[in-house]
Amino acid sequence: MAKSKPESKPKYVMLIHGGAVTTDPASIPPEKEEALKAGLAAALSAGWEILNRGGTALDAVEAAVMSMEDNELFNAGRGGMFNINGEVETESSIMDGVTLRGGAVSGLKLVKNPVRLARLVMEKCKHTFLTAEGAQEFALAQGLTLQDPSYFKTDEQRQEWLDIIQEARKTENANKHDTVGAVALDQHGNVAVATSTGGIEGKLRGRVGDSCIYGGGSYANNDVCAASCTGDGEIIMLAAVAHEVYALRKYKRLPLDEAARQAVDMYADKLQGDRGIIAVDPDGNIALESNTNVFRRAYRIEEQEPFVDIWMNTK
């Protein structure tokens, strides 16, 4: 899908995603579809309201992602997938297109909002990436909200984990590769990105995905664009998908939607799997591309009507 080429440059734009996956449409019944759309709409509004009142893109992407981290329907924060040991390990990153500074965290088991910790790493830490116990100690030192591990273990995720352990899981699963992300352009002409996930279900303990990898699942640069990815983390990292959007836009001077479309297909013969991308550039052009039939996504340009959908083609 999807592009917007307005005649005049928009002052502000908000885009979010809640995961891309190829799945049987029957795995998302109407009531769940409506709940997912409501969650996307709430997250979009959380970020858009900040932009609408003149706030920064960085604040907007953080707010939007936090909204999805608090919603157990999304695989980030509270709704994070169980690893093979029945634990929830989350990760996140945030990047400021103005300064090219970023913060990333992984291996979290207690932090309520990983994206908030990523922001604090960017602003308060001499490092740009913290993991596991060290990241949680930093969160505690910064006064962030920590939760007992049971907070992250929803009934739906627990059942999926049991299916894996019992080798009785279904071959199609609508939540298989969920990740959440947001990109924004603010009224000051700046872009930013934030991405967060609980990873793939049944992952090995200590597995790191693309959501916390600069240039893999997230990238932002005021000169070119901001992009957030979702899908199969291993192939997104290896193909450096978010940075490919940047590179195709910067060096080949492709329109943003075409750059995202090509990044979705980059090295697809060697790195096969699901990919979804949202992106925005400083001119307000947007891209929402995937190679899946489900891509939970939403955007709003200035005060236009918001767009919210989860299907990429006919069900």
Image (cartoon, helix red, strand yellow):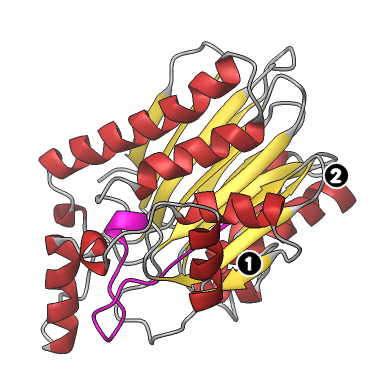
SS majority, magenta: loop
Left or right: where 94 falls relative to 102: left
The residue type indicated by label 1 comes to Ile
Question: Residue 162 placed where, x, y %?
Answer: 13, 80
Residue at 49%, 77% in the rendered image: 133
* Residue 70 in picture, x, y percent from top left: 32, 46
How many callouts does the rendering have? 2
Q: Please give left or right for residue 160 compared with residue 145 in the image.
A: left
- Label 2 and label 1: CA atoms lie apart by 24 Å
**Left or right, 142 with reference to 310:** right
Give the mark, 2 or 1, whose residue is nearer the N terminus. 1
Query: Could you tell me which secondary element the residue under label 1 belongs to?
Result: loop
Is 72 inside the magenta-drawn segment? no
How packed mark 1 is, by other alpha carbons closer than 10 Å (few <14, some 14-19, many 20 or more), is many
Q: Residue furthest right?
A: 251
**What is the x, y in percent for residue 297?**
42, 40
Q: Which residue is mark 2?
A: 253
Observer-side mark, 2 or 1, equals 1
Per the image, is 88 magenta?
Answer: yes
Q: Amino acid at mark 2?
A: Arg
Relative depth, front residue between 24 and 84: 84
Q: In the picture shown, does residue 181 fall above or below 202?
A: above
Whether residue 57 is visible, yes or no, is yes
Chain part drawn in magenta: 75-93
Q: Position of residue 6 (x, y in %)?
A: 67, 17
Find numbered disc 2 in the image and state the secondary structure of the residue it sits on. loop
Can you identify the residue that label 1 sits on?
213
